[in-house]
Amino acid sequence: MSNKEFEKENARPMRRMPGGPGHGPGGPGGGEKAKNFVGIWKKLLNYSKKYHAAIIIALICAIGGTVLTILGPDKLSQMTNLIKDGILTGIDLDGITKIGFVLVAFYAMSFILSSTQSFIMSTITQRISKRLRGDISGKINRLPMWYYNKTTTGDILSRVTNDVDTIAQSFNMSISTLVSAITLLVGSLIMMIKTNIIMTLTAVLSTIIGLFLMMFIMGHSQKYFTRQQKHLGEINGHIEEMYSGHTVVKAYNGEENSKRIFDEMNGNLRESGFRA
């Protein structure tokens, strides 16, 4: 294998912030969006294919727990109706007791299923994170030396810390939360329509209006958040580089230049915070 082929195979380019180092520990580059969101999720699911069976079980538990949570208020309304109807003629205590035991069973099973789902997803997430860090470590050992001369230490460390943690959190929360949210939405709509269709339409319309308002506000504020995260990544990368190489900076009288760059980056970060 030639040197160019080796570099192409083993050196995946890492994006650096314009005008400065990449995002360092504690300051992930929030301004960068995924170019292929669906493709990335497909790769992540393929990367964790040995855990697909456990993930499916966790999703089933999430759906079951959500459905039982939705059915709870309906049973509670039946209990309320029994009490209301029996105020004058006599309350059906046996019926209320049965409904109470059903409610206890529903909420107990919902808690068990939700806890099982959380335990499974947390375990899978930690194992995937461990495997990711191991693969990244192997990748770092295969990279040529010229790559480290072109990339900041803060950017490389961020790949192992912030980026892996972000992937783990997204994997742990996104799938189960999405399934639970969809189940909760559909189930709640069904129960609301069953109760009162006019109130259901009112609630749905008000939610849609609020959603459009939120999208409008986020569309105007996102650019300020992106700029703030960009400057935060720059200043964290600069601090990491200066701190790890402070001996070299001091030996070559680079304190003033380092302070000047820090003041400039800090000013940009402060201005972006005020504008946001």
Image (tube, rainbow, N blue to C red):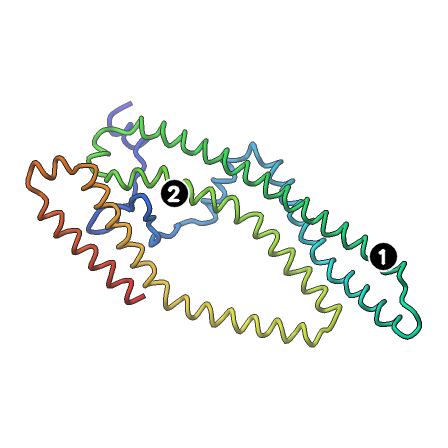
Number of other residues with Cα within 10 Å of mark 2, as a class: few under 14, some 14 to 19, many 20 or more: some
Residue 110 place in picture, x, y as percent: 69, 49
Number of other residues with Cα within 10 Å of mark 1, as a class: few under 14, some 14 to 19, many 20 or more: few
Q: Residue furthest top?
A: 1
Badge 1 amino acid: Thr
Rendered view: 262 above or below 241: below
Whether residue 219 sits left or right of residue 268 in the image: it is: right
Q: In this rendering, which labeled residue sits more in front, label 2 or label 1?
A: 1
Judging by the rendered image, the residue that carries numbered circle 2 is 163
Residue 243 place in picture, x, y as percent: 20, 40
Whether residue 89 sits left or right of residue 74 in the image: it is: right
- Nearer to me, 29 or 26: 26
- Nearer to me, 69 or 82: 82
Q: What element carries label 2?
A: helix
Q: Which residue is drawn at 19% across and 35% down?
A: 149
The tag on residue 97 is 1
Say which quadrant the N terminus sits in: top left
Displayed quadrant of residue 138: top left
Q: Is mark 1 on a helix, strand or loop?
A: helix
Q: Distance between the residues labelled 2 and 1?
A: 52 Å
Q: Residue at x 20, y 54 (%)?
A: 265
Of callouts 2 and 1, which one flags the residue occurring earlier in the amino acid sequence? 1
Badge 2 amino acid: Asp
Say which quadrant the C terminus sits in: bottom left
Residue 195 place in picture, x, y as percent: 75, 70
